[in-house]
Image (cartoon, rainbow, N blue to C red):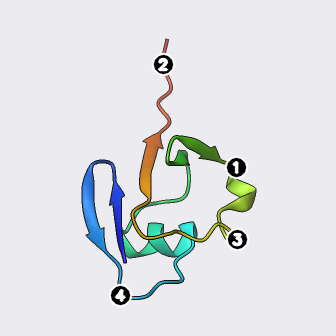
């Protein structure tokens, strides 16, 4: 399966990947980020049950504090 994460193509060896598994595979911390799939923001409470599809465009946003 192929997905794009922040404009970089990644090939996943199995077809049943949820967002938590994707973050783990990419060594990304779950704290302080937001995720969108195909421009739809996915609530953190749904990351475990949200299964990626071949060709999905995933955006991972890091929260930044400041003013």
Q: Secondary structure at mark 1?
A: loop
Q: Which residue is mark 3?
A: 49
* Precedes in sequence: disc 2 or disc 3: 3
Q: CA distance from mark 2 to mark 4?
A: 39 Å
Q: Is residue 38 left or right of residue 4?
A: right
**Label 2 vs label 3: CA separation?**
32 Å
Q: Regarding mark 3 in the picture, which secondary structure is present there?
A: loop
Marks 1,2: beta carbons within 8 A: no
Q: Along the horizontal axis of the image, is 63 left or right of 7?
A: right
Q: Position of residue 16 (x, y in %)?
A: 54, 83
Q: Check whether the beta carbons of the residues at disc 4 and disc 3 lie within 8 A of each other.
A: no
Q: Few, some or many C-alpha atoms within 10 Å of disc 1 (few <14, some 14-19, many ≥20)?
A: few
Q: Nearer the viewer, residue 55 or 4?
A: 55
Q: Quadrant of residue 48?
A: bottom right
Pick out the residue farthest to the left: 8
Q: CA distance from mark 3 to mark 1?
A: 11 Å
In the rendered view, tell whether residue 23 sits above or below residue 17.
above
> Which is nearer the eye, 20 or 15?
15
- Please report contact status of discs 2 and 3: CB closer than 8 Å, yes or no: no
Marks 4/1: CA–CA distance: 25 Å
Establish if 1 lies above or below 43: below
> 10 Å neighbourhood of mark 2: few (<14), some, or many (≥20)?
few
Give the SS element for disc 2.
Answer: loop
Q: Is residue 52 above or below residue 15?
A: above
Q: Nearer the viewer, mark 4 or mark 1?
A: 4
Q: Nearer the viewer, residue 6 or 2?
A: 2
Q: Which mark is residue 43?
A: 1
Q: Which residue is mark 2?
A: 66
Label 4 neighbour load within 10 Å: few <14, some 14-19, many 20+: few
Specify the quadrant of the image occupied by residue 40.
Answer: top right
Q: Which mark is residue 13?
A: 4
Which one is in front in this view, the residue at disc 1 or the one at disc 2? 1
């Amino acid at each position: 399966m192929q997905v794009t994460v922040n404009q970089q193509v990644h090939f996943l060896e199995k077809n049943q990947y949820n967002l938590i598994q994707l973050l783990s595979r990419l060594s990304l911390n779950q704290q302080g980020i937001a995720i969108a799939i195909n421009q739809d923001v996915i609530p953190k409470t749904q990351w475990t049950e949200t299964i990626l599809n071949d060709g999905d465009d995933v955006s991972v946003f890091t929260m930044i504090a400041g003013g």
